Amino acid sequence: MCCTVVRSPESHMDSMREEDGGIFMEKEMDKMSYMYKTRGTCSTQIEVELDGNVVKYVKFTGGCNGNTQGVAALAQGMTVQEYLKRCKGIHCGLRKTSCPDQLAQALEEALMAATM
């Protein structure tokens, strides 16, 4: 993995950045914000905030505005595991992924990064 983790003594937060700029994570206690660069969808980025393994906030950049707002609203309050069970692997037309599937991938990566 090509990421670096830096502890900021002023804020007591961990930050992690992928070398190519694809990932940005901030963690404070059990709360964590995570930026995910999407692949294969109209949306280009997803911002996620977790509190432990519960989805607290989701914001898509780009994509079908109504659909991404709906996916984000439905994901809030779910555990990562419940969201993955419901949405991982959903396709959009002939694409092998979708905005709900990309959010599932973002949540998996965020949860994995939180346990590092």
Image (cartoon, rainbow, N blue to C red):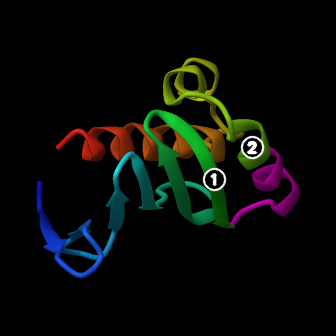
Residue 27 on image: x %, y %: 34, 59
For the residue carrying disc 2, how many other residues have a C-alpha within 10 Å: few (<14), some (14-19), or many (20+)? some
Q: Is 70 inside the magenta-drawn segment?
A: yes
Mark sitting on residue 4: none
Residue 72 seen anywhere in this rendered image of the structure: yes
Q: Magenta region: which residues?
A: 62-71
Instruction: Determine the image quadrant of residue 75.
Output: top right
Q: Is 95 positioned to the left or the right of 74 in the image? A: left
Q: Is 112 inside the magenta-drawn segment?
A: no
Where 103 falls versus 78 (above or below)?
below
Residue, disc 1 = 57
Amino acid marked by disc 1: Tyr
Residue, disc 2 = 71
Amino acid marked by disc 2: Val
Which residue is depicted at the point 75% across and 43% down?
71
Q: Which of marks 2 and 1 is nearer the N terminus?
A: 1
Query: Which SS does the magenta portion mostly show?
Result: helix
Residues at marks 2 and 1, CA–CA distance in whole angstroms: 11 Å
Quarter of the figure with the C terminus: top left
Which residue is depicted at the point 45% across and 60% down?
33
Q: Is 66 positioned to the left or the right of 94 in the image? A: right
Instruction: Determine the image quadrant of residue 21.
Output: bottom left
Which residue is depicted at the point 62% across and 43% down?
98
Q: Is 10 positioned to the left or the right of 59 in the image? A: left
